Image: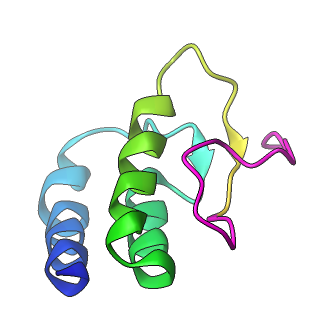
Amino acid sequence: MSKLLIGLVHLYQRFISPLFPPSCRYRPTCSSYMIQALEKHGIKGFLMGLARILRCHPFVEGGDDPVPEHFSLKRNSEKKPFR
């Protein structure tokens, strides 16, 4: 199931994402985060990716937000803004 979801994200990255200007507020981007979370946490990673997408909006500061080692739906506590 994870491989199928990763494949869908790759399709999004290749065909849909280039049609729009970059707007992700985080590093890694939300789609890359989703792939990393799926690889690291399996199907739980999908929930982590969805939570990340919901956090990515114009009213948030953004910055570095790598996939945590343990399952969590919250942003990493180490807040590191872009520079």
* Residue placed furthest toward the top: 59
Q: In the rendering, at what x and y percent does residue 43 appear? A: 32, 71
Occupied quadrant, residue 2: bottom left
Q: Nearer the viewer, residue 75 or 33?
A: 75
Q: Nearer the viewer, residue 33 or 83?
A: 33
For residue 81, above or below residue 4: above
Q: Main secondary structure of the magenta part?
A: loop
Number of numbered discs overlaid on the protein picture: 0
Residue shown at 24% from the left, 54% from the top: 18
Residue shown at 23% from the left, 67% from the top: 9
The N terminus lies in quadrant? bottom left
Q: In the rendering, at what x and y percent does residue 34 appear? A: 40, 63
| Highlighted magenta segment, given as a residue range | 67-83
**In the figure, is residue 15 to the left or right of 49?**
left
The C terminus lies in quadrant? top right
Colour scheme shown: rainbow
Q: Nearer the viewer, residue 35 or 46?
A: 46
Q: In the rendering, at what x and y percent does residue 60 appear? A: 62, 21
Q: In the rendering, at what x and y percent does residue 45 appear? A: 42, 66
Residue shown at 67% from the left, 62% from the top: 66
**In the figure, is residue 11 to the left or right of 48?**
left
Query: Does 36 lie within the magenta span?
Result: no
**In the figure, is residue 18 to the left or right of 35?**
left
Residue shown at 25% from the left, 64% from the top: 13
Query: Does 69 lie within the magenta span?
Result: yes
In this view of the protein, can residue 56 be seen by the observer? no
Occupied quadrant, residue 26: top right
